[in-house]
Image (cartoon, rainbow, N blue to C red):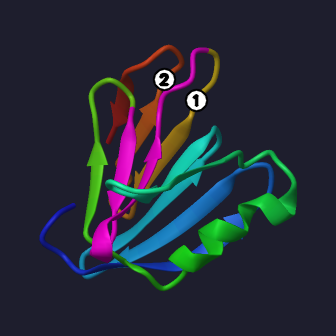
Amino acid sequence: MRGEELRITELRFDWAVTLVISGTTGTYEVRLEREVRLGARHGEVRTIDPEGEPASLAPLLGLLRAEVEEIRVFSDGRLRLAFPGGTVLEVRPDNDFEAWTLTGTSGLLFVAVPGGGVAVWS
């Protein structure tokens, strides 16, 4: 998903956090269900639990309307979103649960499977 203009246009909060990312070729939804790491590439990193107290999710509000430089899915089950200025959001796989899902307008679905790895449906 590199090479197209992407922007976070909506955030949803329940027992997870959903980022709606709009691009020139469609819309993507990233649902974060496990611990999220948010910070600069070589600086302070905050750990955020989507199931935690609602006030603890406030750092994620800074992503609303942010440009997304890259969405990267790793075969080991990690998901990384990179933003201008070096900010990075990363979710690592969970041993027992699906840590995140990524869906696209075309029906493509990526799921971080428990224990590591990624399942892909199209």
Position of residue 105 relative to residue 67, above or below, is: above
Residue 81 highlighted magenta (yes or no) = yes
Residue sitting at x 73%, y 62%: 57
Q: Which residues are magenta?
A: 78-95
Residue 73, picture quadrant: top left
Position of residue 87 relative to residue 61, above or below, is: above
Residue 11 highlighted magenta (yes or no) = no
Query: Residue placed farthest to the left in the image?
Result: 3
Residue 10, picture quadrant: bottom right
Instruction: State the residue position of label 1.
Output: 98
Of the pair 80 and 100, the residue shown nearer to us: 80
Disc 1 element = loop
Location of residue 6 in the rendering, given as x and y in whole percent from the top left corner: 31, 77
Location of residue 114 in the rendering, given as x and y in whole percent from the top left corner: 54, 18
Position of 57 with respect to 47 (left or right) is right
Q: Amino acid at mark 2?
A: Val
Instruction: State the residue position of label 2.
Output: 113
Q: Amino acid at mark 1?
A: Glu
Position of residue 122 relative to residue 41, above or below, is: above
Disc 2 element = loop
